[in-house]
Amino acid sequence: MKILVLGATGRTGHLFTQKALDEGHVVTAYVRNPDKARILLGTHPNLTITPGTLDDAEQLAAASSGQDVMVSILGQKASIREFLHSTFLQERLPLIMQTVTGAGVKHCILLSAYGVGDTVRTASLPMRLVCKVIMRGIFTDKVKADALVAEYQPYISRAHPGRLTDKPGKGGVKVFDMASVERTPGIPTIAREDVADALLTIAKNPQNAGTDFLVTTGDVALHSPQK
Ligand SMILES: NC(=O)c1ccc[n+]([C@@H]2O[C@H](COP(=O)([O-])OP(=O)(O)OC[C@H]3O[C@@H](n4cnc5c(N)ncnc54)[C@H](OP(=O)(O)O)[C@@H]3O)[C@@H](O)[C@H]2O)c1
């Protein structure tokens, strides 16, 4: 599989990129800081590091051409002001989706978060409070950005993990169609390494396009199957 990665220099992004390369995939890391990417990712025969910014549609289109899938693992280093009122994704996602799908990539995986949008309905009370109070600015940005790219929904898979840690992965990460999830307990927490595994699992099946996924190593109550 040929994978275009946005955010390959991030804490989750570099783990994903390494895993994709380890599995034999061909990866293009589209990064604003190629020196950082070279230090983090090293060299690999299947890795291309392409310098470019997210507002450079021409460069991003060239990087997108011929890719099977795009994985966006972008995140912002938010100041307190931005944390309270972020527009990071609203400003960037529409051009990214327009450019990447316009170049022919029909499966785009976006790393979102558990508790964003409708996913909060399945969360516990403590998790809802975290989403509605502490994470409100960042999550509102994600919801508004998702609305701006609604026309590309059939091409988008969103991954919704809980709170991320840099601990070693537990392995055995589970990926559930959000529509099948009834409830999760407590405040779900997951290692970035496990999220990287889940993103690769989602990326490998083009039929996942159009679906939102809960990504978890914890407990989940699922809706009972319809009789
Ligand atoms: N933290 C949590 O508990 C949590 C929970 C659920 C979901 N998430 C979501 O997970 C995602 C990734 O999180 P993370 O902690 O792995 O992120 P991270 O380590 O902060 O990495 C962010 C990545 O985005 C890139 N980036 C940021 N601004 C950019 C810009 N203007 N242009 C180009 N690239 C830019 C960074 O590039 P540089 O290296 O060049 O800066 C880096 O590669 C985020 O969307 C976050 O909301 C987080």
Image (cartoon, grey):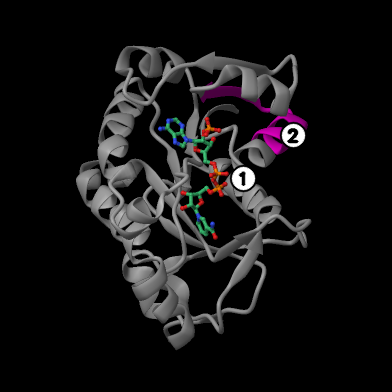
Please say if the residues under marks 1 and 2 sit with CB atoms less than 8 Å apart: no
Magenta residues span 17-30
What residue lies at 72% left-to-right and 34% top-to-bottom? 18
The alpha-carbon separation of the residues under discs 1 and 2 comes to 17 Å
* 4 over 86 or under it: above or below: above
| Most foreground residue, 111 or 209 | 111
Q: Is residue 24 magenta?
A: yes
Instruction: Give x and y (percent) for residue 168.
Output: 78, 56
| Most foreground residue, 207 or 95 | 95
Residue bearing mark 1: 12
Q: Would residue 20 be found to the left or right of residue 134 on screen?
A: right
What residue lies at 42% left-to-right and 58% top-to-bottom? 212
What residue lies at 27% left-to-right and 41% top-to-bottom? 152
Residue sitting at the far front:
80
Instruction: Give x and y (percent) for residue 189.
Output: 62, 69
Instruction: Give x and y (percent) for residue 57.
Output: 31, 18
Instruction: Give x and y (percent) for residue 122.
Output: 42, 79
Kind of residue at badge 1: Thr
- The answer to whether the beta carbon of the residue marked 1 is less than 8 Å from any atom of ligand 1 is yes
